[in-house]
Amino acid sequence: IVEHCIKHFNTNHSLAGQHWVITAGPTREAIDPVRYISNHSSGKMGFSIADAAQSFGAKVTIIAGPVNLPTPNNCTRIDVQSAENMHEIALAQAVNADVFVACAAVADYKVAKISEHKLKKTSSNDAMSIALVKNPDIVASITALKDKPFTVGFAAETQDVEHYAKGKLVRKNLDMIAANDVAKQGQGFNSDDNALKVFWHNGSKELPLTAKKQLAEQLVALIHDRVQND
Ligand code: C5P
């Protein structure tokens, strides 16, 4: 079905008239003027989804954390740094979105009080600690909107992939979740390849290991299929 959908998409631009909003990459949580907390997300999966969606005719907005990637053709890109920035932009964009794909690896916590000046090491302190507070859950605030877009989340897990992914599908009130096992070599974070297990409320589909570009096309076709059957 997915292969068929892709062929079908390529010939008649089935996503024309739809606005897809995609978060991608890591967020960067400042500690002081020169330091931050972040993660290894490359943004490749989110950018590949954006590229696939635009190639099938959608209007696409990417909300990107700090990544080293060119903007795909025909996509509008809004660069952000922190989870708070991403949250603000995502809420503003989601209002006129048909599909929202939360692919960003958002930092769970931010620094409670960003230091105005560079923190200094002292000869007397061998240990130091930084107080952290929880960031807003961006995708959960999108699904809490009265007129919510069809919302897809991601789950990067190292064990019990299906169990945790299905838990997030329900807890975050998502329409679909794409889970990947980041403990496996050669897929997920920073890799060019990925494999996904996709779950929705009454079904699932495995998308086996392949280049993120191909995987993104299969996922976009699957999302479109679910949007139509929802
Ligand atoms: O809870 P966890 O971080 O594992 O959930 C992952 C999913 O939730 C991803 O789709 C991610 O983009 C989204 N998320 C978010 N805002 C957060 C944390 C996660 O949108 N603060």
Image (cartoon, rainbow, N blue to C red):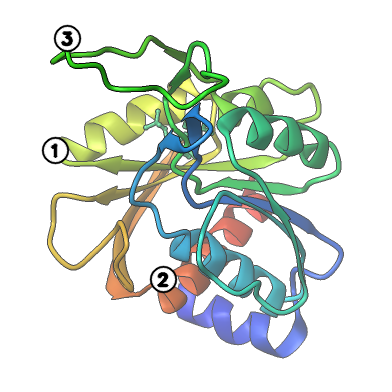
Mark pair 2, 1: CA separation: 22 Å
**Mark number, residue 159:** 1
Q: Residue at x 40, y 72 (%)?
A: 212
Question: Whole-Å distance between the Cαs marked 1 and 3?
Answer: 41 Å
Relative to 51, say whether 185 is above or below: above
Asked whether the viewer can see residue 159, the reply is yes
Mark 3 or mark 2: which is in front? 3
- Numbered disc 3: secondary structure: loop
Q: Residue at x 60, y 74 (%)?
A: 70
Report the label total.
Answer: 3
- 183, above or below 221, in the image: above
Q: Which mark is residue 124?
A: 3
Kind of residue sitting beneath label 1: Gln
Q: Nearer the viewer, residue 27 or 33?
A: 33
Q: Is residue 74 above or below residue 80?
A: below
The crowd level at tag 3 (other Cα within 10 Å; few <14, some 14-19, many 20+) is few
Q: Please, what secondary structure does the residue beneath circle 1 have?
A: loop
Task: Give the residue drawn at x 57%, y 76%.
Answer: 5
x and y percent of residue 107 in the render?
A: 44, 32
Q: In terms of depth relative to the viewer, which is nearer, 18 or 108?
A: 108
User: Which residue is found at the position 44% from the left and 42% from the top?
Assistant: 105
For residue 215, which numbered disc appears in the image?
A: 2
Give the residue type at disc 2.
Leu
Q: Position of residue 172 (x, y in %)?
A: 50, 24
Tell me if 182 is positioned left or right of 6 in this view. left
Above or below 36: residue 203 = below
Residue 63 x, y percent position in the rendering: 66, 50
Disc 1 C-beta below 8 A from ligand 1: no
Looking at the picture, tell me which residue is in the foreground, 164 or 86: 86
Q: Position of residue 21 (x, y in %)?
A: 70, 51
Q: Earlier in the sequence, mark 1 or mark 3?
A: 3
